[in-house]
Amino acid sequence: MLTIACYLLSEIGEMASVPAPQLVVSLAVGAALAVTGLVHRQVPASAARSSHAVLGALMGSYLVPSQLASAAGQALALTVVTAATVAVCAGVAVLIAYRTRTRPVDAVLGLIPGGSAAIVAYAEDLGADSRVVAFAQYLRVGLVAFSAPMVVLALHGPGAGHTAPGSFPNLSHLVDSSHQLAGLATLLFICVAGSRVGRGCRLPAPSLLGPMLLAAAVLATGIAPGFAPAGPLQDVVWVLVGLEVGLRFTRPAIRHIGHLIPHLFGGIVVICLACAGFAWILAGLAGVPFLEAYLATTPGGINAVLATAAATHTNVPVVAVVQSLRLFLVVLLTPLAIRWAARRMTGRPAERTDVRNGADDHRR
């Protein structure tokens, strides 16, 4: 019922020219319900996994040779900007850890851009406090989700990218194909098989990355084009993603890291401003529109960024390629980097226990 209500509210938001309304409205509703205590449950795991799988298939539909070639001309500049973005996030995280006496592993995992669901999932395995990591990650995603559409609104004015506001959704058009049944069957296969392959290969965020890779492989071979989710199906995915993020902002989560909120908020704002600066430099060097460069270099928030790019008819393939490749690399390389750093440092296990006990004492 909550999903349906958010979907209907997002339709009203679309009539009011709210950018990326399905994601923004549902995220705001979920956060409000969680903070006020009116809703205590999260999005069911099965629904979350399904939305991740469909989203993965959507991202994979952009990762094909012809689309990758569209970003090849700016490969060096995009690589440098991506590395700079990760470096800024890590630097801000270390600074926050130093000022608040938070463990660096918690702060770094909390602010690293991309793959929030996967990073939260394996935070405990890396010796981090998953509550701190989850709140920081979804605070970052939430701010990016709200700020990206607002930037579009500021640059293009109300109604940017919207088509036929108030029109009833076309329920007969659920995938980007002229043969809906075949397209839906292909999408279902990619979601189910991709998720199983992802789990079998022990990929982080298997429900997302597995279908993404399988979808890219299917399109690269040209076996079955036309399965990308579209219309109401895509809208429902954005609604579920927004609710999943918003409902994590619960009172216990906020109380647990209340003293960190101002530092995290300020750090994320600094990161977003730095990324906007990178986008301005990239736009000048690579000769691409600023909006395209900005959406490609935002510090994560790929769901909101893709929704915003699609709604404004920006160069979605370039945005999707840059964001997806960074997500994939960050998710895969972060555990290796954290474990390498842990081996280089001594005395961390004892510090971990002391800090967690101190945090628990503080809570009491």
Image: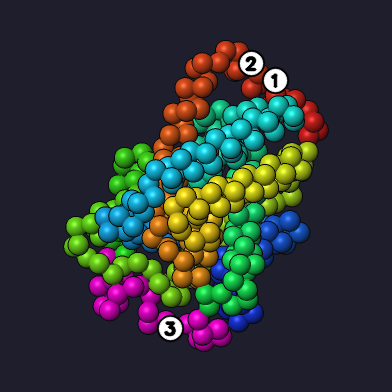
- Say what amino acid the circle numbered 3 marks: Asn
In the rendered image, which quarter contains the N terminus? bottom right
Label 2 sits on a secondary structure element that is helix
Kindly indicate the quadrant of the structure image that contains residue 3.
bottom right
Disc 3 or 2, which lies upstream in sequence? 3
Residue 327 percent across, percent down from the top left: 45, 46
168 sits to left or right of 138: left
User: Who is closer to the viewer here, 207 or 58?
Assistant: 58
- Say what amino acid the circle numbered 2 marks: Ala
Task: Tell whether position 31 is magenta.
Answer: no
- Residue at image position (37%, 82%) is 172
Disc 3 or 1, which lies upstream in sequence? 3
User: Who is closer to the viewer here, 43 or 74?
Assistant: 74
Residue 260 percent across, percent down from the top left: 74, 39
Task: Tell whether position 167 is magenta.
Answer: yes
Label 1 packing within 10 angstroms: few (<14), some (14-19), many (20+): few
Can residue 256 be seen in this snapshot? Answer: no
Assign the magenta stretch its main secondary structure: loop
- Report which residue position mark 3 lands on: 170
Residue 29 percent across, percent down from the top left: 67, 65
Marks 3/2 in contact by CB < 8 Å: the verdict is no
CA–CA distance between discs 3 and 1?
57 Å
CA–CA distance between discs 3 and 2?
58 Å
Marks 2/1 in contact by CB < 8 Å: the verdict is yes
Asked if 194 appears above or below 259 in the picture, the reply is: below
CA–CA distance between discs 2 and 1?
6 Å
- Residue at image position (51%, 70%) is 312
Q: Which residues are magenta?
A: 163-186
The mark found on residue 354 in the picture is 1
